[in-house]
Amino acid sequence: MIDKREIIDTASKLGLNPHVVEKDFVLGWILAGIYQHHALADSWVFKGGTCLKKCFFETYRFSEDLDFTLTEPEHLDSDFLVATFREISEWVYEQSGIELPTDQHAFDIYENPRGHRSCQGKLRYQGPVSPRTGGLPRIKLDLTADEVLVLAPAKSPVYHPYSDAPSAGISALTYAYEETFGEKVRALAERTRPRDLYDVINLFRNAESRPSASAVLDVLTQKCAFKGISVPKLEDIYEHRDALEGGWANMLAHQLPSLPPLDTFWDELPAFFAWIEGGAAPSIPAAYQHATGESVIRDRRLQLSISSSADSALEIIRFAAFNRLCVALDYQNSTRTIEPYSLRRTQDGNILLHAYNLDAGEHRSYQVDRIQGAHVTDRTFVPRYAIELNPVGPASIPPSPRRSTGVPRKSLGSGSTSGRRGSASQSTGTKYVVECPYCGRHFTRATRSTTIKPHKDRAGNPCSGRSGTWIDTKY
C-alpha cells in the first residue's frame, strides 16, 4: 500500500481532507478489481459523477460512490455479488494492500419503481489513513440492470494519480460521453440536486469536449421517455432554486478545494437550455495570442525544477480556472489577483502562466518557477480568453531544452503514464481513434468526441452509426 504521507501530501496540495483523497485512491483500485474480473469486465457499465472524475476530467469534484448499469440482470443476486466481491477484494489486497473486509460487505437487493431488481451495495475499506479503531469508511455501489443504454459503451482509461498505479494503467467500460451528459441532464430534471447542476454546467462549459446539442438532446429524450418524465425546460428547474441553495454547501463543499457560488452555475442555465433546445452554442473567446514558438501545456503531471509551493499552486490555479474563480497569486514577494488562462512553454524552454491581472487591468504572464503560492478567492470571472488550463491532454509531454537555472532539472512527464481521453493540445498532435460499432470502420480525429456522421462502410454501403467507441490514442 502507498504510504500515508502520499495521501496527506496530495490532500495538502489539493486543499482537501485526506479522507476524501484516500477514498479517491481506493475507488481507483476497486475499479481496477471490477474490470479485471472476467464476469464483470464486459457487462458492468460505469456511469455517474465518479465516472466524470475518474474517466473524463482530472480536475473535477471528488466523488464517493460507484454507479453501474449492468447488461446482465442475473448479476443482481446476493450470492453472486458476495462471491464475486470476495474475489475482487482478495485481488485488490494483493495488488495494493487495501483491505476490503468481506464480512463487512453488504448487498441490498430491492424492487425499483419500474418493478425490476436493483441493488445498493456497501464496501468497507482500510486504507492508508483510515482509522484503526471504530467504524471503517465505506463506498456505496448503485447497481441497476434496466436502464436504457442509448449509445454503445466505451473503454476509457481510469485516472489514478498515485505512485502505485499499474504500469499498464486501469481501464473501465463507461457510458459514452454524450450519454453521460444526457444522463446528467435527466438527473437534474428528476431530482435536482446541487451536484447535478454542478455537473451539467461544467459539461456545458467545456467547449473543447462539448458534443452536438442534437446528440445530447436525443439521449436526453430517450432517457426521459424511459423514466416516464418530460424533457426538462428551464422553468422546471427554476422551481427548485431554494432547495439547490439549501443543499449547495452540504453536498459539494467537501468534494472541492473551494466551493464556487451557486449563482455562477444557476446563471448559466438559460444559455444551456437555449443550446440544447435550439443548438445555439455560446460564443467561445479566442485564446490569448501565442508568441513565436510558444506551445500550450495541458499535462498536470509536470515535474519541474520548482519549489513544492509552486507545484501546489498549479493545482490550485487549474481548479480555479475550471470553476471560473479568481486566484490570489503570490509572485516575487507580492500578491496580485488574476484570472488564470493558460500554461505555455516558450521557445527557450521557460514555463509561463498566462493570466489577466485584475489589479493592473491587463494581460500578464508569470514564470512558473517564480510562483510562491496561490489561493482561490470567492471572486468569479467571465472568461475573456479561452481557458487552456483544463488538463485534458495526454499523460506526458516531451521535454524540451531548457536554459540552465543553476538548479538540477527533473525530467518532464514522469509519473503515471496511463492514457486519457481528451482534446488534443497544440503541443502534442494527439489523435484519437474511434470505431463504428455497426460497420467496423475506424475514424481518426483530433478531439475526444465519439460522435460519427453518416458514412459508408468498407463495401460502400450507407451506415448511419451515430456514435462510435473510442479504441486507441496515438501520440
Image: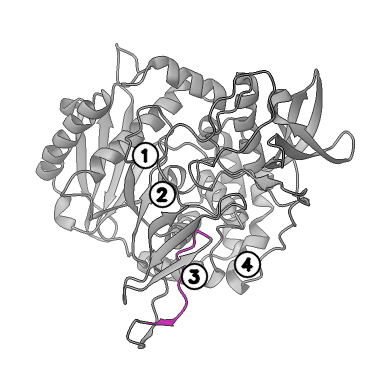
Element type at mark 3: helix
- Looking at numbered disc 1 in the image, what kind of residue is underneath it? Asp
Outermost residue toward the top?
133
Disc 3 and disc 1 in contact, CB within 8 angstroms? no
Give the residue number, with chain letter if any, for mark 2.
Answer: 48
Q: Could you give the CA–CA distance between mark 4 and mark 1, rounded to whole angstroms?
A: 30 Å
Marks 3/1: CA–CA distance: 27 Å
Query: What residue does disc 4 label?
Result: 275
Question: Bounds of the magenta span?
Answer: 447-456
Q: Which residue is drawn at 56% across and 33% down?
A: 302
Q: Which amino acid does label 3 sit on?
A: Ala
Task: Determine contact: label 2, label 4, CB under 8 Å.
Answer: no
Residue at the location (14% across, 55% down)?
74
x%, y% of residue 33?
A: 24, 38
- Dominant secondary structure of the magenta stretch? loop
Crowding near pointer 2: few (<14 within 10 Å), some, many (20+)?
Answer: many
For the N terminus, which image quadrant? top left
Residue wearing tag 3: 215
Residue at figure coordinates x 65%, y 24% from the top left: 310
Residue type at mark 4 is Trp
Q: Earlier in the sequence, mark 4 or mark 1?
A: 1
Residue mark closest to the camera, 3 vs 2: 3
How far is disc 3 from disc 4 in space, using C-alphas?
12 Å
Q: Is residue 259 above or below residue 5?
A: below
Distance in Å between CA atoms under marks 1 and 2: 9 Å
Q: What element carries label 4?
A: helix
